[in-house]
Amino acid sequence: MDEKQALDAFTALSQETRLRIVRFLVAAGPEGSAAGEIGQAMDGASSSRMSFHLSHLEQAGLVLSRREGRSIIYSAAYPALSGLVEFLMRDCCQGHPEVCNPAVAALSSCCEPAKGASHA
């Protein structure tokens, strides 16, 4: 990710509803969520309001959309989100890994399987 892409992403994320949408879609996983479900999760926001915000996020490359029947399904663009984190942390350590350890630990703890979860 270059600086222009990062600025576009941060501009899109600087609005409360759009930040909440991205966090919702990250939690929804790769399968994503229908626009109506996203609107309900955003306190019942109107479809025109959701369309406006989702369009901004898609233009910034943070959200992907696909059509399934009559629904549009949105999902987080995980490579772009990872690229944004990498952009921020790229020059973090400068030969001192202890500087980055808290960030690495925070990300690692997010990816640990839930206790009692089984993967068949």
Image: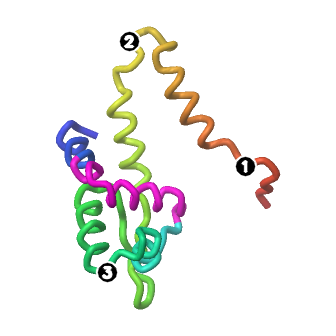
Picture quadrant of residue 85: top left
Q: How crowded is mark 3: few (under 14 residues within 10 Å), some or many (20 or more)?
A: some
Front-lying residue, 65 or 21: 21
Which residue does the numbered mark 3 point to in the structure image?
47
- Identify the amino acid type marked 2: Gln
Q: In which quarter of the image is the C terminus?
A: bottom right
Q: How crowded is mark 2: few (under 14 residues within 10 Å), some or many (20 or more)?
A: few
3D distance between C-alphas at marks 2 and 1: 33 Å
Mark found first going from the N terminus, 3 or 1: 3
Q: What stretch is highlighted in magenta?
A: 11-30
Q: In this view, does 24 lie above or below 110?
A: below
Left or right of 47, for residue 103: right
Q: Is residue 67 above or below residue 28?
A: below
- Which residue is farthest front? 43
Mark found first going from the N terminus, 3 or 2: 3
Q: What element carries label 2?
A: loop
Q: Which residue sits at x=47%, y=60%?
A: 24
- Identify the amino acid type marked 3: Ser
Front-lying residue, 88 or 53: 53
Q: In this view, does 47 lie above or below 54?
A: below
Q: Which of marks 2 and 1 is in front?
A: 1
Which residue does the numbered mark 1 point to in the structure image?
114
3D distance between C-alphas at marks 3 and 2: 46 Å
Left or right of 29, for residue 19: left
- Which residue is farthest bottom? 70
Q: Does the magenta stretch include residue 12?
A: yes
Q: Which residue sits at x=33%, y=34%?
A: 87
Which residue does the numbered mark 2 point to in the structure image?
94
